[in-house]
Structure formats: C-alpha cells, structure tokens
Image (cartoon, grey):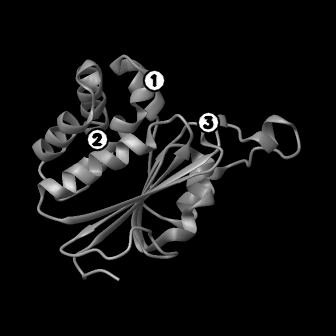
C-alpha cells in the first residue's frame, strides 16, 4: 500500500544489461526529490542471460518493495521479449519504454521455440504510445554497449516531470567515476532521441 502520489516503476531485462544500476540511479533520484524509496531485485538465471526484474517504488511513504500486477506506472524494458513478458504489470494508461534489442532466451537458443515475431506490434496494440528506442546503437555511439541502461534513463527523463539536472546528479552519485563520462553521453543520447 502506498500514497496516491507514489510511482511504481518496473525495470525488466536480461542478466548483464545493467538493470540493477538503472534501479539504483532511479532510487537515488527519488531520494534526492525527498521521497521514501523501496527497491526489490529479482534475479532469474541472470548470469546466464536469464530474466532480471527490478521494482522501484517511491512516494511520500512506501510500505512494500514490489510492484503488483496491473499497478506499474512505468515499465522500462531493456529487451523486447522481456517487455512482452511483463506487460501485465502495467496499469491502464501506464507508459512503456522499450529497447528494440533482441536477446534470445535459452529455449530459443536450443531451438525448442522460436523468438516471437512482431513483438513491437503486439506491444504497441496493448500499450498505445509505447516508446521504442534502439538504445544499444546509442550506447555504442556513446562508447560502450553496456550503457544501454543510461540511454533508457535518458529516454525516461524526457517523459517525466523531474528536472533533467536531477537525473544527471543521480547518475553522478551512482555510476563509478571511471564510467561516468560514457554514461553521461549515453544519457544525453537517450534524452535527445
């Protein structure tokens, strides 16, 4: 249970994509805005490219760390199939930000099933206004393919009613200094996309 001014954000992806760092950036952002924050990380077979889900909840008072079905205000998906897998967590009129990257899960790799076709069309029909972005290309342009997370944070920042500088400050407070320049560039690429 939370207050009416709370926000529930679900970050979904595949192990190694940086979902956990993204959740920490958003947590630091929310704290800087004076909110109570709860984070919860759920790892599947993360080290083997399995599903990783992070819950970020913030507001004046947040009691539980996990996002219930049908209650996420925002889903940030680092991979298309993960976006489709978790779409049921989104509330009516919620927003989705989806990286267009495809990472085949183990059943697809082994040939047991095929990677679904037209995931973007299916998601767009379910959630009109979904923002699709080639975050991997932008991260590579920034200097590191692993900066997909801060590209997506930049895309999110453009659509939130929080000052851009607050996002940049949260990135600076969270990202190790040796990776900071690349992550700032990646954030800007996402913000300006």
Whole-number angstrom distance, CA of label 1 to CA of label 3? 17 Å
16, above or below 26, in the image: above
Q: Picture coordinates of residue 181 (x, y %)? A: 23, 21
What residue is pinned by disc 1? 145
**Mark 2 crowd level (few <14, some 14–19, many ≥20, 10 Å Cα):** many
On the question of residue 5 being in view, the answer is yes
Residue at numbered disc 3: 47
Q: Secondary structure at mark 3?
A: helix
Which residue is drawn at the image coordinates 85% and 46% (left, top)? 113
Residue placed most toward the observer, 179 or 98: 179
* Residue 145 drawn above or below residue 64: above
Q: Nearer the viewer, mark 1 or mark 3?
A: 3
* Residue at 39 percent of width and 29 percent of height: 147
Q: Is residue 168 above or below residue 160?
A: above
**Which secondary structure, mark 1?**
helix
Mark 3 vs 2, N-terminal side: 3
Dividing the picture into quadrants, the one containing residue 73 is: bottom left
């Amino acid at each position: 249970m939370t207050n009416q001014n709370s926000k529930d954000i679900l970050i979904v992806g595949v192990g190694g994509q940086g979902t956990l760092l993204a959740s920490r950036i958003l947590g630091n952002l929310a704290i800087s805005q004076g909110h109570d924050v709860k984070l919860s990380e759920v790892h599947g077979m993360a080290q083997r490219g399995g599903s990783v889900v992070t819950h970020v909840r913030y507001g004046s008072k947040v009691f539980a760390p996990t996002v219930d079905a049908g209650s996420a205000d925002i889903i940030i998906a680092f991979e298309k199939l993960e976006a489709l897998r978790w779409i049921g967590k989104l509330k009516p009129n919620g927003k989705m930000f989806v990286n267009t990257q495809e990472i085949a899960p183990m059943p697809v790799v082994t040939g047991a099933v095929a990677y679904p076709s037209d995931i973007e069309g299916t998601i767009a029909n379910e959630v009109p206004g979904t923002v699709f972005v080639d975050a991997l290309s932008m991260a590579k342009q920034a200097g590191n393919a692993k900066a997909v997370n801060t590209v997506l944070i930049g895309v999110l920042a453009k659509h939130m009613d929080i000052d851009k500088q607050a996002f940049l400050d949260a990135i600076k407070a969270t990202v190790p200094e040796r990776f900071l320049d690349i992550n700032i560039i990646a954030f800007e690429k996402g913000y300006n996309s």
